[in-house]
Amino acid sequence: MREITYLEAVREAMSQEMRKNDDVYILGEDIGVYGGAFGVTRGMIEEFGPERVRNTPISEAGIAGAAVGSALTGMRPILELQFSDFITIALDQMVNQAAKIRYMYGGKGKVPMVLRTPSGSGTGAAAQHSQSLEAWVAHIPGLKVVQPSTAYDAKGLLKAAMDDDNPVIFYEHKLLYKTSSDVPEEEYSIPLGKADIKREGTDVTIVATAIMVHKSLEAAKELEKEGISVEVVDPRTIVPLDEETIVNSVKKTGKVIVVHEAVKRGGIGGEIASMIAESEAFDYLDAPIKRLGGANSPIPYNPELEKAHVPQVPDIIKAVKETLNRA
Amino acid sequence: MQLTKEKLLIPDLSNDKLIDLYKQMWQIRLFDEKVDEFFAKGMIHGTTHLAVGQEASAAGVCALLTVEDKITSTHRGHGHCIAKGATADKMMAELFGRTTGYCKGKGGSMHIADVEMGNLGANGIVAGGIPLAVGSALTAKMKKLDYVTVCFFGDGATNEGSFHEAVNLAAIWDLPVIFVCENNQYGMSGPIKEMAKVEHIADRAGAYGIPGVVADGNDIIEMINVTDEAINRARSGKGPTLIEAKTYRWKGHSKSDAKKYRTREEEQEWRKKDPIKRYKEVLIEAGLLTEEKAEEIRLAVKQEIEDAVKFAEESPAPTLDDLLTDVYA
């Protein structure tokens, strides 16, 4: 199998779908000849033309609403927001309109759209271009929320998101764009709500999202040298959440650490930890559930401070050891 | 058609249609008056926003729409729904929270929608429906469909960022959408005169490079005429128009409004411009209606609303199992 990058996987998923289905189009700021802020749509306007690769004004609320309205009337838009921080400006349309339309209308009408947007820190872009706000949208019934961590997952999950008849928020981690993995050339779908065990282990479970999957795998490799066997579970989608896979893993290891980049307070880790505590896995816990997340501060510019804001490999290793010591 | 010496109706509408519109204006008024009565008596819960006095814009604008055409509406949307073909029984059932309502009792007054009939929904968020209308128009353009989308909103909505973003988007893409601002002079309590520096909201159209038209929102013939031109423009690919319908809501903003922000004299002045009465006079002068016939129509509508209430009252309530249905498709 050939290897392609996460960024190429996202582009390939969109292009393959657009070749098949005329109702699918993409809209967003600078997605035309510029190719998008991160280059994801590069080459697409040349293939599909400006009608289907629709370059928009800088109007996040307007273009989000246009996507919702066109989805409600028969199109299947993909909306690209340059940075996930800008979802603040589009939120009325996503939260008050897209998420609720079907329910408010008594099951009539649907909003099949994907909002794709890069999230995460590590680029030195500071407080307004580095956040991970997925917990906000995960809080809203009616939305689905996807966070792929590999190129393979990105392609398959985006296919599923495009096929879904609901509004899906699809978070791409900007530091993962250049990472590669084996990706089939043909289309394939990874069901939303199916976690992936990225590494099997027996001593402790780490539930990690997006880039934290990779940091957790690195930590697991280090811990293996000390004879500690770590299982890394990647939920891949936080709504719907594959509770079963997480619960089963915790039942097996009896210890769990939840890791995400988003600010710990109010982050999705709290939801995952609570879900575990309320589940049958509680009786299997040998140590308290531990959460790692971003600091309670905006994301700073200084590279050392920026790094300190989010969990790093040594933090995960430390958390694993602390958890094992308390067992 | 020259209806009277002063009133020229530009599009070709049948006499039956003109009488139907008169009836529809009464449907809008009597529906909302009945709702007002029920809220006063505490028979319906939640809140509601009534469009009594604004019947001409809903009926006039929708007079030329087909089933394929779309509308988006506002929190003050009962009239738009009726004008786009909704029936009083299912609307009343919705306000009663019954399963036979347009939204199975889950939307209520502010969310009545009938997607299959082209009503893309009322909206509880001021200006929330404007970008949706633009999206609907984008679908028409991309799928090469002939429908137009009418976007209703109030004067207050024009100070929202969504208005600016959406109108600009529709303008640059020449989308088949008609923006209808029902300027009823107040956004809740805020007079538009204090909330915007321009004299007419229609003047804002110039900022987007599209036509802006000021119309007497209490004159249904004028509303039909200006909408006709806007529809022709939209259907021929020339893009959107901003119509400002100057009107007035007779009732308060919502069910709890002491109306301290306006005078009783001002209210009386506007009541003299009663859109139904004015239309009746035109129809009588044109020889299409008599006082007797007009009264017959009003009474028939009154009965229709009573029947709608009966239908709503006799309809089943949702079961608790319905709480979690239709969250996802």
Image (cartoon, rainbow, N blue to C red):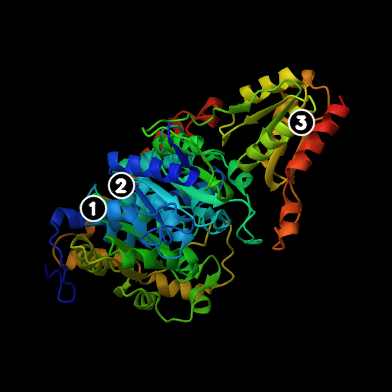
Q: Secondary structure at mark 3?
A: helix
Quadrant the C terminus of chain A occupies: top right
User: Relative to A36, is A201 above or below?
Assistant: above
Mark 1 or 2 closer to N-term?
2
Q: Are marks 1 and 2 in contact (CB under 8 Å)?
A: yes
| Residue in the picture at 30% in, 74% down | B213
Task: List x then y, in percent, for residue A135.
Answer: 63, 44
Task: List x then y, in percent, for residue B8.
Answer: 16, 71
Q: Secondary structure at mark 2?
A: loop
Which numbered marker is on residue B179?
A: none
- Characterize the local packing of mark 1: few (<14), some (14-19) or many (20 or more) Cα atoms within 10 angstroms: many
Q: Which residue is mark 3?
A: A223
User: Relative to A145, is B214 above or below?
Assistant: below
| Residue in the picture at 28% in, 38% down | A20
| Residue in the picture at 71% in, 56% down | A306
Task: List x then y, in percent, for residue B48.
Answer: 51, 52
> What's the chain of the residue with tag 3?
A
Q: Amino acid at mark 1?
A: Tyr
Q: Do the residues marked 1 and 2 share a common chain? A: yes
Q: Secondary structure at mark 1?
A: loop
Which numbered marker is on residue B147?
A: 1
The residue lying furthest to the right in this view is: A326
Q: Amino acid at mark 2?
A: Gly
Q: Which residue is mark 2?
A: B118
- From the viewer's perspective, tell me whether residue B104 is left or right of residue A83: left
Task: List x then y, in percent, for residue A304.
Answer: 75, 58
Is residue B275 something that shows in the picture? yes
| Residue in the picture at 49% in, 66% down | B161
Is residue B87 something that shows in the picture? no
> What's the chain of the residue with tag 1?
B
Frontmost of labels 1 and 2 is 1
